[in-house]
Amino acid sequence: MTGAWNGEHLLEALRAAAHDLERHAASLNALNVFPVPDGDTGTNMALTLSGALRDIAPDPSCGVVAERVGYWATLRGRGNSGIILSQMLRGVAAALAGHHLMSGREMAAALAHGSARAYEAVLRPVEGTMLTVIRCAGEAAQRAIAAGEASLGAVLDAAVREARAAVARTPQLLATLREAGVVDAGGQGMLVLLEALLRYARGETGGSFTPPVTAPALVTDHADAVGYCTSFVIHRVTVSLDTLRRVFATLGDSLVVAGDQALVKIHLHTLRPGDALNQALEYGALDQVEVVNMDLQRAALHSSAPVPVEQADIAAAPEAVGIIALAPGAGFAAILRDLGASLVEETVATPTVDEWLALFERVAERSMIVLPNDPQALETARSAAQQVNRRIDVVPAMSSPQGIAALLALNFQAGIDQNLQMMKAAAERVQVITFEVQQDGERHVPAEAPQDAYNVCHALRQHGADAAEIATLYYSRGGDVARAEMLAEAIRAAFPALHVEIHAGGQPGDSMIIALE
């Protein structure tokens, strides 16, 4: 079926892909070593796609079928790889909205949108995974269109050839794969899916081109506990997706936040799944809860010789960018490092131009983004950046909370210019209030003093807390958690719709820094 597809053709092609994923599930599971070696990537991808197709009736419109597939894939997505796949399908649906037929041009646009949506769902995208394979396939499809190869078969052929090459390159992009001697399981799963679509377009039958893998990969790391793979759906979400990403990023890793305000699917790896579920209840109706003990999964896997991988050239990935950030205390420094800053300098003094130049020399990447997180440091950073023969962009973050918001907005797939716009906008949305401890002469007023709570709530209201979504309290090196919790309870009582978090900032003195978003 090399001509344009209607909705019935698209549904048949996806069913063929689901069948192939089921056939290859065990082989894909055997490759699964990243982000944890829990041996379920193939199963999760197969169950996600088959679950998405289960209740869909044929429809002549590609747009209608794609929208239904994306919805059910989000609702029934399983595990990290399955939920990323569901978001790729949501991106495909967005590109096909309103299209009755799908030609090569629509397929290329759908793959590109699918890649963008998948990257957006992952808090910290990693190259050398299924994200890379999706991106490379979409870029190849776009190149085919630009070269005049507009048929559906030609576009899919270009996408499959590049996806196959991208899968072979994944060990060179990700050390975990290289050490285990395997390619990325999710990337291989995407190749299986795309090959099935290509065979359907050609009218071919039979199994996937991809040879099956029979032996599980041998993994010697991950000696520590990896916890629970936790996923759930929240219906009718009361806060933004950015707020959900920020909140759940503090509760685990491998975070994926997928969907929209009506229905959000969240996946994370955590040692305390109950904390994540209790937090989710604050934002809407909970559904489709799944908690899997990954330590037991890993223990059950049979280890044998690793599968050899053919080496290839490294794919062209988005330009690597170094991130430099200043932090006034150990707590802020730890948060900035966790969010991906390459170099965090813990200091309360404004760096001189020479000190900035020394910091620049410590970053290997040719291009850098600087988060000064202080008004005076902003000026000296800008002066230093002008003296270096490298690209150094300074985000006007005036405080550490603004720097944290800017890092959360960083999109690893986007270019530097686009990231700078998003990071600047994110920083500007944060209102920061520094609140000093009440004192009576030389004596500190006790933590439960009502003056603190009244003054904090009054200041928050003046800064727009009634319309905000989240307030974060950062207590100082000389502060205490009890006082921060007392203030947090007062804020929750005054602003019931506001989500309130507490973190150790570690800034000097007895100040409390409050960020409002």
Image (tube, grey):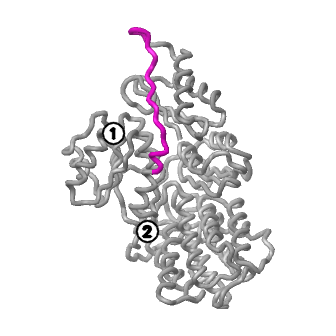
Q: Which of 309 and 411 is in front in this view?
A: 411
* Residue identified by numbered label 1: 375
Taking the magenta stretch, the answer to whether it contains residue 111 is: no
- Residue 305 visible, this angle: no
Q: Residue furthest front?
A: 462
Mark 1 and mark 2: Cα distance apart in space: 43 Å
Visible in this render: residue 488?
Answer: yes
Where is residue 398, by image quadrant? Answer: top left
In the image, residue 77 sits, relative to residue 398, either above or below, namely below
Q: Where is residue 364 in the image (x, y as percent from the top left)?
A: 28, 57
Percent x, y for residue 134?
53, 71
Q: Does the magenta stretch include residue 426?
A: yes
Q: Identity of the amino acid at label 2?
A: Pro
Residue 461, label in figure = none
Instruction: Name the residue at 58% across, 89% down.
Output: 151
| Quarter of image, res 448 | top right
Q: Look at discs 1 and 2 and give the one toward the viewer.
A: 1
Q: Please name the residue shown 64% across and 64% down the image.
A: 86
Q: What stretch is highlighted in magenta?
A: 425-443
Quadrant of the image containing the N terminus: bottom right
Label 1, secondary structure: give it: helix
Residue 233, position in %: x, y? 69, 52
Q: Which residue is drawn at 73% across and 66% down?
A: 51
Q: Mark 2 points at which residue?
A: 171
Residue type at mark 1?
Pro
